Amino acid sequence: MNKTLFTTKTQRAARVFVIFVSLWFILCFAHVNAASALEMMQKVDQQARSHSEQHLGSLEVHDKGGKVLKKAWQSWRTGFGGNSKIIVRFTAPAEVRGVGLLIINHTRGSSDQWLYTPSIQRERRIAPQDRSVRFLGTDFSYEDMEQRDINDSEYELLAEETLTGSSVYKIKATPKKDVRSQYSFLFLWVDKNTWVIPVTEFYTDGKLIKKLFARSVEKIQNIWTPQEFEMQDVRRSSRTIIRLSGVQYNQPVSDDIFTLRSLRSNP
Amino acid sequence: MGLWLISFRNFRINWLKNLLTTFGIVLGVAVFFAMRTANLSLREGFRNTLDRVAGKAQLQVTAGEVGLPEELLEKVQRVEGVDMAVPVIEAVVQTEIREEGNLLILGVDFTGDTRLRGYQLEDQSNAEIDDPLLFLAQPDSICLTHEFALRNHIQVGDAITVETALGPRRFAVRGLIAPGDLATAFGGNVAVMDIYAAQYMFSRGRHFDRIDITLQPGIAIDSARSALRRQLGVGFKVDTPDQRGKQMENLTSGFSIGLFLSSLIALLVGVFLIFNSFAVSVTRRRKDIGILRALGATRRQIEWLFIAEALFMGTAGSCAGVAIGWYAARGVISFMDRVVRESYNVSVKTVTVQTSLAFIVLAVALGISASLIGALIPARAAARVDPVLALQKGKFQMLMAGESRRRRLIGGTLLVAALAFSFFAPGAGLTAQYANFILVFVGLALLVPSIAHGLARLLRHPWQRFFGVEGALACDSLIQAPRRTSSTVGALMFSLAFTVSNSTLTVSIKQSFLNWMKQTINADMFVTSTENLASRVFHFPPAMAADLAAVPGVRQVDSVRILNHDYRGNPVLLFSIEMSHFFRRASFILKEGNAGTIERALTGSDAVIVSDNFSYLYNIHSGDTLELATPTGLVRFRVAAVMEDYGSDKGTVAMDRQTYVRHWKDDLVDTFDLMLEPGVSAENVKRLILSRLGLQKRLFVLTNEDFRAKIIAIIDQFFALSYVQIIVAMAVAILGIINTLFISISDRRRDIGIFKVVGGLQRQVRKMILLEACCISLIATLLGVVSGAYLAYFTNRTIGLTFSGWWIPYTFAWSTALLIFPIMVAVGVLSAWYPANTAVKLPLVDALGYE
């Protein structure tokens, strides 16, 4: 009887100990994961970092009916991430030539965006409330066009996987509570070798809504640069392919071109 | 049960007469139902469009017609509790497809609007829109509703010509709005375009018409509205879409009430007709009633017999009236649609006739009530039939003895009381005015038999002199039985009274307008942005004044801005012009204030001049301070004077253009008033303006004569519908003449028989009946003209003042009054032709059977 009692007490104590130790390990592991996930994202950020960038771009929007719309543009960026400014000027087709988009990103919070239409010589501000709207009929939203600071999200390393022959980390990025975003969270697959993100999945209210693929990764001026992006809208069954060419980093770009006055000037 | 069979027999034998009587109720109810239904449909159509266009918007920010400066948008978006705030521009314009009527173009910001308004854009491949970037890049991009496109065989990629501030422009259809809420607004005639392109195409400068707002979940509308009002200031209105609807209804309230009053006329005339018909029926069926009474039927049973017949005819007539009114409402809607657009600058495209079961029941109940009221006195008279007298051949009982001193006294007293009320309390409240209106009606109705009797006596001598014995006999018929004809005379009198009154009101308004325009709107030429003078869809930039001044022959150019501005919940007219220019060529007709100092007082300062009706409606006088909410805040204006003005039935406030621009931050122009060099041909200048500027801008050049003609056309159009109603009322009254003559012949069968026996010729019988009809028409016309003159005085003095604050000088419509006499005599003769032939063919044996 006493033995039984003793055995029971010991077993209870052992169980409590095991639970306590397990919990401690879980917490420690999570902390390490969080820390390493952020570090990984910092590496991604670091790898892509440049003072400026410019490129020629083209896009194709494929709707579910098979119709394809094509556009071309030229883009300039100064700064990086949350401190960057971007100007995009459409060059083709002729009917949209001169349409411009100015994005001024901020370290915290949404960016300021203006769209300029030369035919009526008017710029319009894209209000923060409208960031979830599709960007000019593509599968990107205005929010997707922003460059967010990596500190706007919290990261969690979920797993190490193999993706199309490459070793990748699977990371979950959740926008911080004070950051306005249409997305609940994102799954990012980070390439261990290049620190490029080949695949991103976008979730809203727990549902997958979009997938972004980065392809044709080449090292340009020591920066691994994907030269083709494909955004797939799962709900609309449409996709947008963006191809970059003539990518140049760290070229001198005047700050004057990232102003409303410059946007209004019709090159 | 047996009594019902008697009624059935009566319906079977006298089906034509009963049908004519019922037709009176049918017309009365149809007109009433059509008018009210059209009014209701117009209101519902307007609300429906507002609701559907508003989408999920819980609040809307406006600043009247002046619009909202663009920078206000970000301010609104930052207000706590606001989820989405999207700008809108609305323009109702014509397209090349004239048969479709107007198109409501919504200028929206596509980056957020679809979420708020919940519409889906589609193209042929079911994508959202053909090419959103192209859509925004090209200002000629437009999306039509799927239904509109289908109806007009338009496909994505086609073009449609739309009127813009730059003149007619081809728009490329780059998407379709899928069926849904927005697509059903404005009868489906909705198009969507980019808001900034709309600013450009419809000359809105850097302004929006409205900002639509949705709130964050859990935010109460009232608290958000308070927060917005605090942030934006008094110059901007923050309302729910429903409140905005009410404000627009308020703008057209005068027109709606006018229609309601005139729609009652037809119903009132219907009462007279029923009265007449039942009086006829009682007389005709005197013998049957006598038999029934002799067989034991009680007075009450006889009374109920006639009331039941009235109930049956009233029900049948009302139901038929509702059905006809339903169809007629479509035409009325289209007319009213045009009037409110051209007179009030309110566009409503009402496609469906809107009514409710409650209103159908009300219309039927009114029709039945009219029948019962009309039948009540004859039914009582029937109950009083003496069976002995009724069954004795050759005996005649006057059932509704004509003369009554008491009735005359009451009628006279009521009329004098109404007149005194009109004179001493012209601006009393609406209920008092309605009550007074009823007094006038009842007073006149009570006096009709006595007056008709007196006039018939007066006519007898001249009638005998001109038309011989037939003339005398015709008058005798009226003198002997004044109550037989009084209802017909009454019905005709009221119809004609309204014709004369309406005509007098129109002539008075026209005369006042012309006098006012002669002194105040005396420019040689007007350059407007729209054909419709009330519409302010398009505007001119201020710089255009210089272009016009450069046209050879132009001496002076004045920039006029006219818009509705909310004052104490009413849309008053705000008028601005360069006062220093204005006083060089014109002056105001001052009711208060100093004419010598008015120019100096108004020019460039925070002073205004208000219209006499504004002064009356809001009790604001010269020397007072008027507080107006402007986009720059609440501004206190000194009232320098009160002027005679007919710009708006809600009142007008005029100020110097410089003052307006300073406070409203709006330099757009609606009309340029031009003065020409002496001796210059207006037509030449018009041609020059059109050739120089007409290709760049949408503009209309009107000479002073053109402008006046347009104003007169608007006034005529405003009153046109009431004329239609009066024609219907007259048609009902004519039915009354036919009925009256039938009963007259029936009553006088013996007289006619004797007349024939003693050698009276058929043509003499015919002449006698025709003269009787002429006599009825003449008496009714005379009474109609006199009472019409009084009604017009009443309308001018009381109704006009109550609804609009206007004290319109009285100008009697002599031409209408004089024209009515020959027309009504001709109508009387035509109406009497068939009854006269019936009298001619009356078998002598039947006629003399009594002997």
Image (cartoon, coloured by chain):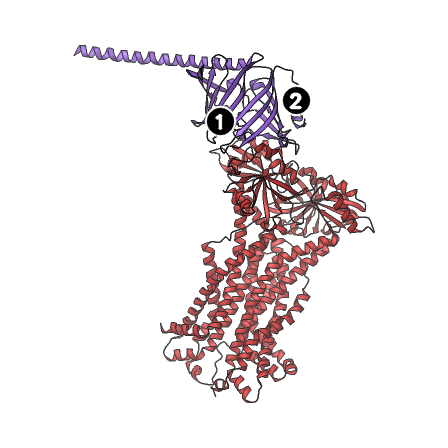
Residue wearing tag 2? A257
Mark in the foreground, 2 or 1: 1
Query: What shade has chain A been given?
Result: purple
Report the amino acid beneath label 1.
Gln
Q: Position of residue B425 (x, y in %)?
A: 61, 58
Residues at discs 2 and 1 both on one chain: yes
Q: Residue at x 51, y 15 (%)?
A: A44
Q: Which chain is red?
A: B
* Whole-number angstrom distance, CA of label 2 to CA of label 1: 32 Å
Q: Describe residue B254's horizontal placement relative to residue B299 as left or right.
A: right
Q: Secondary structure at mark 2?
A: helix
Q: Quadrant of the C terminus of chain A?
A: top right
Q: Describe residue B191's horizontal placement relative to residue B711 as left or right.
A: left
Report the amino acid beneath label 2.
Ile
Query: Are circles 2 and 1 on residues that touch, CB within 8 Å?
Result: no
Q: Position of residue A150 (x, y in %)?
A: 51, 18
Q: Nearer the viewer, residue B74 or A241?
A: A241
Q: Which mark is residue A232?
A: 1
